[in-house]
Structure formats: structure tokens, C-alpha cells
Image (cartoon, rainbow, N blue to C red):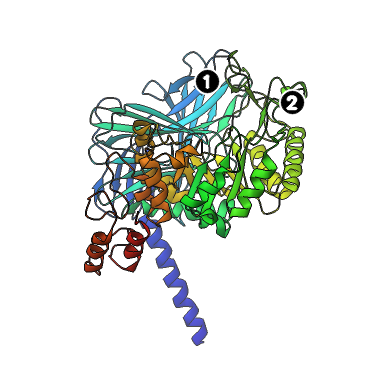
């Protein structure tokens, strides 16, 4: 009997809990299609398919302004009226008719908007509250002829109170000071994982997708006076002619308390579960320096000089000129005669070596091109072939981009690299343009999308070369879980933010992208430097010739290498500017000597002069000064 009453009590308690949850989560819709969603975390209101009001209950912050003029949000569909031309956006406005407004479940509603202007078109928007997470879930379905995409948006966001933080262009923030009125972020090329964070003073809200099929998407930012809008688009796969409907990915929205790392960590945990990224080996985690090695010619004698300025065991040599394009064109890579000796000498000193190939490249002049031409990427709208310098008659080595979904092409590339690896025991392989994932107008190839082919080519290369570390040109969600090294483009981002490094660097270590030498091009170097400090990028420098290591005028180059050798932080190493203090020169007299040792010794336990960035003056700082004696 006691067990019976205990069960009854449990049932009553459970019903009370469920009732409380139901009361906390409410979703209403009226005949005009206006939706009000409320949970214990937020209150949100939609009109014409766009979010126009958002209040964070956790922080008592409202991130939107009262409606005034255009919202900046785009909700509707994109239609390709004319083949070969970009889609025409058809946004939901008051001229559209609400043909259906209904409740599907207690926590799910759907509104259908219709317009017959130019062409019959219907957009259905389903808005739900996930009872488990409290996420507001938005999904759309578009019906019309030749649909390119479907879009919904958030509008009237307060420019003065809300910053947009987005893992795009290696990590970016748009705030009140930004000189940006409009910007699009295409996934996966520039928008590296489908997450946006709208950060207020004490909290914010996020919008993200948990799609694992790599659907093409876009986030679009528009500023209008004191407010801005951010829209979220899902694309159809190309070709678009004949596609008469589209269902978007699910977009999830929720509020949070704290800084941007709260939603970023949540998304990172999801990424780890969804994609099971490959952990980097110990030697990659221990890297202190990447050197763009001299490549014309490959001279093994330079390695002895390098070994005097760096720690070879923690230095990676990125080698471009290891193969001879005059003897064979990509996807063939015949090594230059010096390659074997260079690799053997590098390993003898303890360096790690990473040669470069083009991930899915084929020269139009290669005898293999007629075989692979049918798989060449084509622009999703205009249909022309994609590649590098295809129309430049002055360039000797253009590249056609072949869709890695083609099994025939992948097989050839993998066999070439397997032979290379078995002949020359390289440590890593840099895959140039491996983040190129096109919405290919050819459609599916061998039943695969370009993204699926991209993943397979990475995996097949790794299987053919056991123990190899794969690196790439830039980074995004399609590539990160198979690569442990990635170049980061630095000079195009005016307001860098660490969001992308926070998300990816557990598995993929970022290093510099063709960084200008700090002595030869100090102004260009500074453009990279500023972003790389924010992103915590592995120190990277270009050494083109042995003379760069012996020339006394290459002051910043020597300081850069010395900073790494002394174990300074990555930020300190990157911060090589005109007039920078000599590493270990504590009193600034231009030379490291006993006086600097005395100053550091007398400052033990204090905060300054902290030479290695660990927050306190100790024996490690003393060692740095001692090792820097001229």
C-alpha cells in the first residue's frame, strides 16, 4: 500500500512539473499570422515571418527597438525567373495574403503566406518551442517555380546595445563602431559554422543550425539607422531550374546569460558530438613555429642555419616548391631532384615537414584534364567552369577545380599521394583550396554533393597515409574534423574576434597564411599581425633565402625567431613592430647584459618585467635574459 501511495505522489508531482513547463512555454498565433512565443528565458514576437521583438528574461534586456521604417530583416523566397541570372528575392510584406494560420500542437504553429505577383508563390513558416531545450525552432517551406532559396530574419536589433559575433572570415564582430552597412556570409565558404551570436551587455541570444548535411546557407546583415537586421537563408542544391519547392534547415534560437562563450561552448560541444573531429597528435600540439621554407631551389644547407635560430623539434617546414610543374601538371606532382635530400636532412635535424598540393586541382594543360573535365565545378547560376586563373593567358599554371564527389578523380589523387608517402615519409600534407565547396551546377556526382565528396577525399587520403596530419587553406565545418592544421586568412577582416578559434582550435591549430616578412613588408605584416593576435594563430614566418638569417638588417625577423626560441607567448611573438624592444632587453638600452639580469632578479614575485607572459617574474624570465646575451 505504501508503494501505491508513493507512486500516486510521484504522478501528482510529475503532473505538476509538466503543468509548470506548459505554463512556462506558451505559443500563440492570430489570424494575421502574428506569433508570440514565451518561455522562462525569453519573449519573442514575429510579424510577416520576421522576428521583430526579443526580450531576454534572464538579464531583463530587450535587444530590439520599436518598429520604425524597414526592419532590416529579410523573410521570403528567392526565385530564378531567368536561367543564368541570380534569383530575385520576393520578401513577405503586407501585400502578401495570410492563407492559413493554425496551431499544429500546443507548442507548434504554422502560417502560410501567398502572393500571385509575377508568379504564384507560397511560404509556410513553422515556429515551435522545443520542450526539452526551450529553443525556438524556425523552419520554412517554399512552393513556386525555380526556387533558389528561402529566408527568414530578425529585425530592429538595437545597434547601440547589440553586437553581432559570427564565426565568419576567421572570426568577426560587428558593433556600433563598424563601418559596415551590408554584408553576406555564405556557408560554408565564409560562414564557417552556422552560428550567430547577438551579444548584449549582460547576455544575448543566438541563432544556429544543427544541420549535418552541409546544406548551403547564408547569413545576411543589414544596418538601417539605429537598428540592424540579420537574416538566415537556406539554398536549394543547383541546378535550380525545375526545382519547385524547398524546405529549410531548422534554425534554433534561445537566450542566454553571460558573454558570447556561453552559446559558443554549447555549439562547440554539439560540433564535437555531431562530427567526432580527429584529435591532433602530440607533435602538432607542441608546435611553436611554422616556416614557409625557401622553395627555389630547395637547398638543404639552409637547414643548419634554421636549426641555430629555432627549435627544430617544434618547428614545421611548409614547403611549396618540392615538385616540378614543368615535369608534370596537377594532379601529378613529380618531385624536384633535391626533394629527397632536403626531406632527409630536415628530419635529421628534427624538423617536421609539410609539402603542399592542390586538394582538387587539375591543370587544363594536363593530359588527364579531358578525363576529369566533366567533373569540373560549375557556377550554380551562370554555369561557367570554376578554377584559378583560367582566363589569364599570362599565368603558366592555371587550375581547374574538380568536384571531389567524383570517385574516379578521388581514386587518382589518393593513389598519387599514397605513392608519395611511401617513397618520402612526410609528416603532414597541406591541401590547398580544400575549403572550396561549390553548389555545383552539375548536380550530384556519383550520388554525392560536393561537401560529401570533400569529406570523403580527406578521409581517403588519411587512410592511404597512416599517421599523416592533414592541413588546409582556411577552415570550416566541412573540413575541420579531418584536418589538424589550417592557414587563416588575416588581412581582409577589419574587426577580428576570437569566436572561430574558440570553436575550432581544440582540433585544428591555426597558422599564418602567406605572412609578409616583418622586415621587408612591415605595413602588410601589421595587417596580418593584428588579426593573428586576436585569433591566437601559431607564429608563422617566411624565410625565402639563407641570407635572411645572416643579414644583420633583418632585425624583426631575428627578433621573431628569438621570441619563439625564448618561449614567449604567441601574442608576444606576433607583436614584432618597428622599434620593438629586443627580447630580454629589460632596461631598453639596446643590448642584453648583466644589468638586465639584475633587474629581473630583483623583481622576482612581481608582475613586471614579465617576459614570458605567465603573469609573474620568476626563474623562467631570468633564463630568457640569460639566453639572450649577445
Q: Which mark is residue 372?
A: 2
| Residue 565 percent coordinates (x, y) | 43, 54
Asked whether the beta carbons under mark 2 and mark 1 sit within 8 Å of each other, the answer is no
Residue 121, position as x, y percentages in the image: 51, 22
Q: Between marks 2 and 1, how big is the CA–CA gap? A: 32 Å
> Toward the viewer: 447 or 9?
447
Horizontal side of 459 relative to 248 (left or right) equals right
Question: Which percent across, then down, holds residue 558?
Answer: 40, 45
Question: Crowding at label 2, few (<14), some or many (≥20) Cα neighbours within 10 Å?
Answer: some
Residue in view at x 40 percent, y 59 percent: 21
Reading the image, the residue beneath label 1 is 79
Residue 496 appears at what percent x and percent y?
36, 40
Quadrant in the picture for residue 448: top right
The local secondary structure at tag 2 comes to helix
The one nearer the camera, 450 or 161, is 450
> Is residue 508 in sight in this rendering?
no
Amino acid at each position: 500500500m505504501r508503494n501505491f501511495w508513493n507512486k500516486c505522489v510521484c504522478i501528482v508531482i510529475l503532473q505538476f512539473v509538466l503543468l509548470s513547463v506548459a505554463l512556462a512555454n506558451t505559443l500563440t498565433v492570430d489570424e494575421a499570422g502574428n506569433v508570440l512565443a514565451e518561455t522562462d528565458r525569453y519573449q519573442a514576437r514575429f510579424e510577416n515571418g520576421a522576428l521583430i521583438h526579443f526580450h531576454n528574461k534572464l538579464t531583463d534586456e530587450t535587444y530590439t527597438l520599436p518598429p520604425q521604417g524597414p526592419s532590416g530583416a529579410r523573410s521570403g523566397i528567392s526565385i530564378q525567373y531567368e536561367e543564368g541570372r541570380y534569383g530575385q528575392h520576393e520578401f513577405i510584406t503586407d501585400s502578401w495574403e495570410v492563407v492559413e494560420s493554425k496551431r499544429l500542437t500546443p507548442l507548434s504553429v504554422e502560417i502560410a503566406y501567398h502572393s500571385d505577383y509575377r508568379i504564384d508563390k507560397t511560404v509556410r513558416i513553422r515556429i515551435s518551442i522545443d520542450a526539452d531545450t526551450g529553443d525556438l525552432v524556425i523552419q520554412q517551406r517554399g512552393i513556386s517555380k525555380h526556387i533558389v532559396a528561402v529566408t527568414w530574419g530578425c529585425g530592429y536589433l538595437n545597434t547601440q546595445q547589440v553586437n553581432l559575433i559570427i564565426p565568419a572570415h576567421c572570426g568577426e564582430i560587428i558593433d556600433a563602431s563598424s563601418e559596415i552597412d551590408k554584408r553576406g556570409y555564405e556557408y560554408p565558404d565564409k560562414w564557417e559554422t552556422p552560428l550567430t551570436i547577438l551579444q548584449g551587455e549582460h547576455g544575448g541570444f543566438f541563432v544556429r543550425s544543427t544541420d549535418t548535411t552541409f546544406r548551403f546557407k547564408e547569413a545576411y546583415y543589414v544596418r538601417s539607422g539605429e537598428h540592424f537586421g540579420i537574416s538566415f537563408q537556406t539554398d536549394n542544391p543547383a541546378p535550380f531550374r525545375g526545382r519547385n519547392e524547398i524546405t529549410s534547415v531548422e534554425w534554433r534560437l534561445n537566450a542566454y546569460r553571460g558573454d558570447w562563450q556561453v552559446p559558443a561552448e554549447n555549439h562547440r560541444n554539439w560540433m564535437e558530438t555531431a562530427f567526432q573531429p580527429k584529435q591532433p597528435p602530440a607533435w602538432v600540439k607542441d608546435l611553436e613555429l611554422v616556416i614557409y621554407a625557401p622553395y627555389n631551389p630547395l637547398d638543404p644547407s639552409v637547414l643548419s642555419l634554421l636549426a641555430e635560430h629555432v627549435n627544430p623539434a617544434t618547428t614545421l617546414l611548409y614547403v611549396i616548391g618540392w615538385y616540378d610543374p614543368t615535369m608534370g601538371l596537377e594532379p601529378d606532382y613529380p618531385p624536384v631532384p633535391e626533394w629527397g635530400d632536403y626531406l632527409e636532412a630536415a628530419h635529421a635535424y628534427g624538423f617536421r615537414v609539410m609539402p603542399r598540393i592542390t586538394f582538387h586541382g587539375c591543370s587544363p594543360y594536363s593530359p588527364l584534364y579531358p578525363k576529369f573535365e566533366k567533373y569540373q565545378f560549375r557556377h550554380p547560376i551562370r554555369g561557367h567552369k570554376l578554377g584559378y586563373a583560367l582566363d589569364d593567358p599570362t599565368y603558366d599554371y592555371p587550375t581547374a577545380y574538380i568536384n571531389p564527389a567524383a570517385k574516379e578523380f578521388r581514386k587518382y589523387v589518393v593513389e598519387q599521394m599514397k605513392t608519395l608517402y611511401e617513397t618520402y615519409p612526410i609528416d603532414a600534407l597541406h591541401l590547398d583550396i580544400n575549403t572550396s565547396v561549390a553548389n555545383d551546377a552539375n548536380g550530384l556526382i556519383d550520388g554525392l554533393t560536393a561537401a560529401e565528396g570533400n569529406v570523403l577525399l580527406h578521409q581517403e587520403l588519411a587512410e592511404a597515409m597512416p599517421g599523416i596530419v592533414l592541413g588546409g587553406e582556411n577552415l570550416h565545418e566541412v573540413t575541420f574534423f579531418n584536418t589538424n592544421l589550417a592557414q587563416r586568412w588575416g588581412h581582409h577582416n577589419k574587426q577580428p574576434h576570437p569566436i572561430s578559434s574558440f570553436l575550432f582550435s581544440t582540433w585544428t591549430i591555426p597558422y599564418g597564411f602567406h605572412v609578409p616578412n616583418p622586415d621587408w613588408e612591415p605595413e602588410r605584416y601589421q595587417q596580418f599581425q593584428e588579426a593573428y593576435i586576436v585569433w591566437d594563430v601559431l607564429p608563422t614566418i617566411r624565410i625565402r633565402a639563407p641570407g635572411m638569417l645572416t643579414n644583420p638588417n633583418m632585425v624583426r625577423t631575428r627578433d621573431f625567431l628569438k621570441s619563439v626560441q625564448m618561449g614567449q607567448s604567441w601574442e608576444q611573438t606576433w607583436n614584432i613592430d618597428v622599434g620593438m624592444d629586443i627580447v630580454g632587453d629589460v632596461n631598453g638600452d639596446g643590448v642584453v647584459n648583466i644589468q638586465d639580469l639584475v633587474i629581473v632578479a630583483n623583481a622576482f614575485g612581481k608582475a613586471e618585467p614579465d617576459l614570458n607572459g605567465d603573469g609573474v617574474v620568476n626563474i623562467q624570465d631570468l633564463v630568457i635574459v640569460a639566453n639572450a646575451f649577445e
